[in-house]
Amino acid sequence: MARPPETRALALIGLRATGKTCAGRLLAARLALPFVDLDEELSRSGDLSPALRGRPAGEILAALGESEFREQEARALERALGRAGRSVIATGGGTVEREANRALLAREALCIWLVAEPEVLVARMQRDPTPRPALTGRDPLAEIRYLEARRGPWYAELAAARIDAGGGPPEAVVERILASGLAGGSLQGPAGSR
């Protein structure tokens, strides 16, 4: 059974470099809610070896491989959504890869899908020192397009709101989220269930 909308977490979903963490921190501050970055949650996990604990998610992904990384990510999502009270959660771009994660997000969170053009995302990744290992062996633009085609239907299925995150500062993205009415808990869940 899903939580009532006013008690659900607000989960930011979308491809890497859409600004989920930046916008999430600002949104949480505006709403006076706790903020959880899923990559940081994963990084603090006691399930990781001491050598990996506290490392950036990209380094953990490179060290563990995608399959084990996704397992750790699923555990981090369960912990984040299992806490009492409402929060803002910035998910990883690939969190939706697992069906169980999608089911958990649909039940426990109102999902806000941040979108931007692939060229914008590649430019952001090139400016950002955060390690983001390639997932497909393709060049960065081809990889983003591939991931957009693969994950887009899952994001759309979960999304209670689709927010343009391609232009302007993170504050503008937060204003768009607030204007959607979602942050107040007034929407009932994924677009398909309204």
Image (spheres, rainbow, N blue to C red):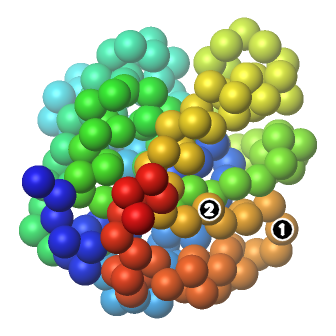
Can residue 147 be seen?
A: yes
Can residue 57 be seen?
A: no
Q: Residues within 10 Å of mark 1 (few under 14, many from 20)?
A: few
Tell which of 31 and 21 is nearer to you: 31
Residue 102 picture location, percent across and down: 35, 39
Tell which of 76 and 97 is nearer to you: 97
Q: Residues within 10 Å of mark 2 (few under 14, many from 20)?
A: many
Above or below 116: residue 61: above
Residue located 68% across and 48% down the image = 17
Residue located 82% across and 41% down the image = 118
Please state which of the two labelled residues, at mark 2 or mark 1, is closer to the viewer: 2
Residue 80 picture location, percent across and down: 23, 54
Horizontal placement of 9 versus 16: left or right? Answer: left
Label 2: element kind: strand
Residue beneath disc 2: 162
The quadrant the N terminus occupies is: bottom left
Q: Quadrant of residue 193?
A: bottom left
Horizontal placement of 132 versus 1: left or right? Answer: right
Q: Quadrant of residue 32?
A: bottom left
The quadrant the C terminus occupies is: bottom left
- Image disc number at residue 167: 1
Name the residue type under label 2.
Arg
> Mark 2 or mark 1, which has the lower sequence index?
2
Residue 8 picture location, percent across and down: 25, 68
Residue located 58% across and 70% down the image = 23
Q: Disc 2 and disc 1: Cα gap in Å?
A: 14 Å
Residue located 45% across and 53% down the image = 192
Label 1: element kind: loop
Above or below 37: residue 62: above
